[in-house]
Image (cartoon, rainbow, N blue to C red):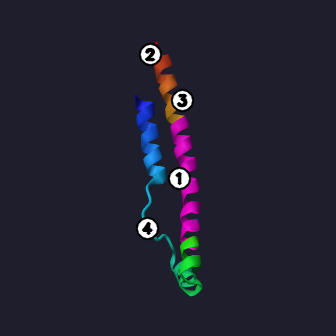
Amino acid sequence: MKFRLYMLTIFFLLFYTETVTAQCSICTKTASQLGEGPAAALNSAIIYLALAPFVIVGYLGWRWWKNEKKVISEEQS
């Protein structure tokens, strides 16, 4: 049951879209000079690059949690 809930949550998070602006002041100035289309692509690229560290840290946290759960269950046995 938990697995289904996790998968459903991940599914909605992956396909939920919202307009987000994640630009520093230099990127904002550059994007305003490029025009509407390239500015949107630049913004998407910034968000894409920002997600990579979060995914890595999330994976490491999940592995740590899984290992700790195993260690605790072995200690109680």
The secondary structure type at the circle numbered 4 is loop
Q: Marks 4/3: CA distance?
A: 37 Å
Residue drawn at point x = 42 percent, y = 63 percent = 18
Residue located beneath label 1 in the image: 54
Q: Earlier in the sequence, mark 4 or mark 3?
A: 4
Residue at horizontal 59 percent and vertical 61 percent from the top: 49
* Circle number at residue 24: none
Name the residue type under label 1. Phe
Q: Do the residues bearing badges 2 and 1 touch, measured as CB atoms within 8 Å?
A: no
User: Where 54 sits versus 71, above or below?
Assistant: below
- Residue 60: % across, % down: 56, 42
Q: CA distance from mark 1 to mark 4?
A: 19 Å
- Characterize the local packing of mark 4: few (<14), some (14-19) or many (20 or more) Cα atoms within 10 angstroms: few
Dot in front, 1 or 4: 4
Q: Is residue 36 above or below residue 18?
A: below
Tag 3 secondary structure: helix
User: Is 53 within the magenta?
Assistant: yes
Question: Which of pointers 1 and 3 lies earlier in the amino acid sequence?
Answer: 1
Q: CA distance from mark 3 to mark 2?
A: 14 Å
Marks 1 and 3: which is nearer the front? 1
Asked if the residue under mark 3 is in contact with the one under mark 1, i.e. CB atoms within 8 Å, the reply is no
Label 2 sits on residue: 76
Which mark is drawn over residue 67? 3
Question: Which region is colored magenta?
Answer: 42-63
Label 2 sits on a secondary structure element that is helix
